[in-house]
Image (tube, rainbow, N blue to C red):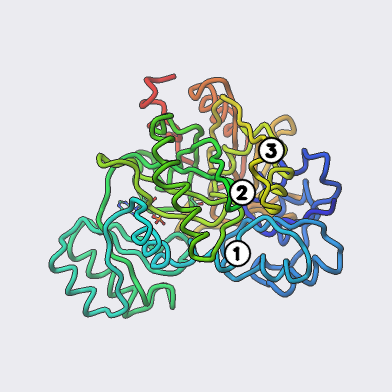
Amino acid sequence: MKIMVVGSGGREHAIIKKIKLSPLAEKIYALPGNGGIAADAECIPIKATDIEGIARFAKENAVDYAVVSMDDPLILGCVDALNAEGIPCFGPVKDAAIIEGSKIFSKTLMKKYGIPTAEYETFTDCAEALRYLKGHPAPIVIKADGPALGKGVIIAQTDKEARDAVISMMEDKKFGESGTKVVIEEFLTGPEVSVLSFTDGNVVIPMVSSMDHKRALDNDEGLNTGGMGTVAPNPYYTPEIAAECMEKIFIPTMKAMNAEGRTFRGCLYFGLMLTEKGPKVIEYNCRFGDPETQVVLPLMESDLLDVMMHVTEGTLSECDVRFSDDSCCCVVMASEGYPVSYEKGFEITIPEDISEDVFIAGAKISDGRLLSDGGRVLGVTARDATLAGAIEKAYARVKRVSFANAFWRNDIGARALKAKGGK
Ligand code: AMP
Ligand code: GLY
């Protein structure tokens, strides 16, 4: 089969490396991919948001199956456009991708169907939002309604920060149209867990749980980033909590989307917070998480492409979806200065024996050399029978990968390890 993957990050590299293992995959295109992905797929320079260009390419090249794994094309209706050309896809249609595309949609859905989440109000008027803040002191959370590259969430620790956030989003339009509507919600506390799941609208099959590390610096200090590293499984996510999430969150969400006429087929990502009052949804994503995918897929023992095709066909219940009991750790190596400003264009060297375990996020090829070309450059992963072993191996590998200006967190997995008593 000819497979096409739409996206260009470390997540797409992990997906492509896994799909490559399937006996069903004969040829893989990446649109646009990146310099690292080029080792595993043929990269085609069509932007992930050029929906017409993607559909045309797929048709002209007789693509048999497409995987759309990036938020923007999903929210823009890439799957609908491909389906219109008769190309089956993994990923939700536009009407279902709205679960990530609009926070007001997802919050309203959760309220309507009794799915546990933070208390909230939505606002389209700046003065009203500011009035509401007077009765709701900090800490409080302000979220832009639409997509804002992961930066549209402000955790305001003071009343002034909360007011400034509302004004910058609603009046100054810091996130453009995405921020003209906002959600103001209760500040929750507790360990965070990411759960990626496969769903075809009939059943939902969670993958192994994981833990992201969103802040740029050690000890969860510094700015929020796209994610500086991950571990799987997440030790806070016990079998009891998993059962509770299945009953109160996962199945109700799948059924709610069906009831709204927005059946979700693809990877539904649950960003959860385990509060004293039980697990609550912090956010939904309509796709695999990045860098969660880089630790989840290496633990998957089933044929990913086969599972994806069952999702598309609505026959996921017939599928055997298995994960190893091992642990996995991914350490992101970024460019110094990320997420604000950074230099790029430095040569990357990766020893051959670990290249299968390095997922490239931001790199290009120039004169046959692999050069850094983004904030997050790559993720180095390792798998082991224990979490402690996986972390140790991942950091040993980080020392063997090099590019000028690289920086990374030194405590990926430390909190998880502590929760497990060091094992
Ligand atoms: P989101 O983009 O919605 O995932 O939010 C980004 C991060 O902000 C989350 O991973 C949480 O760490 C934090 N966050 C979001 N909503 C809340 C909330 N209601 N209470 C506390 N922290 C939150
Ligand atoms: N790692 C969080 C996300 O993919 O949105």
Report the side of 233 relative to 22 (left or right): left
Sequence-first disc among 3 and 1: 1
Near mark 1 (Cα within 10 A), the count class, few <14, some 14-19 or many ≥20, is many
Location of residue 369 with respect to 79 vertically, above or below: above
User: Marks 3/2: CA distance?
Assistant: 18 Å
Q: Is mark 2 within 8 Å of ligand 2?
A: yes
Q: Identify the residue at image location x=16%, y=63%.
A: 136
Nearest to viewer (mark 3 / mark 2): 2
Report the side of 214 relative to 62 (left or right): left
Amino acid on which disc 2 is placed? Arg
Q: Identify the residue at image location x=53%, y=35%.
A: 208
Which label was assigned to residue 11? 2
Tag 1–tag 2 contact (CB < 8 Å): no
What x and y, as percent, mark residue 345? 64, 56
Amino acid on which disc 3 is placed? Ile
What x and y, as percent, mark residue 340? 45, 59
User: Marks 3/1: CA distance?
Assistant: 32 Å
Sequence-first disc among 3 and 2: 2
What x and y, as percent, mark residue 101? 49, 66
Which residue is at the front of the view, 71 or 105? Answer: 105
Which label was assigned to residue 350? 3
Report the side of 390 relative to 91 (left or right): left
Sequence-first disc among 1 and 2: 2
**Is residue 182 in view?**
yes
SS for dot 2: helix
| Residue 65, quarter of the rendered image | bottom right
Quadrant location, the C terminus: top left
Location of residue 385 with respect to 174 vertically, above or below: above
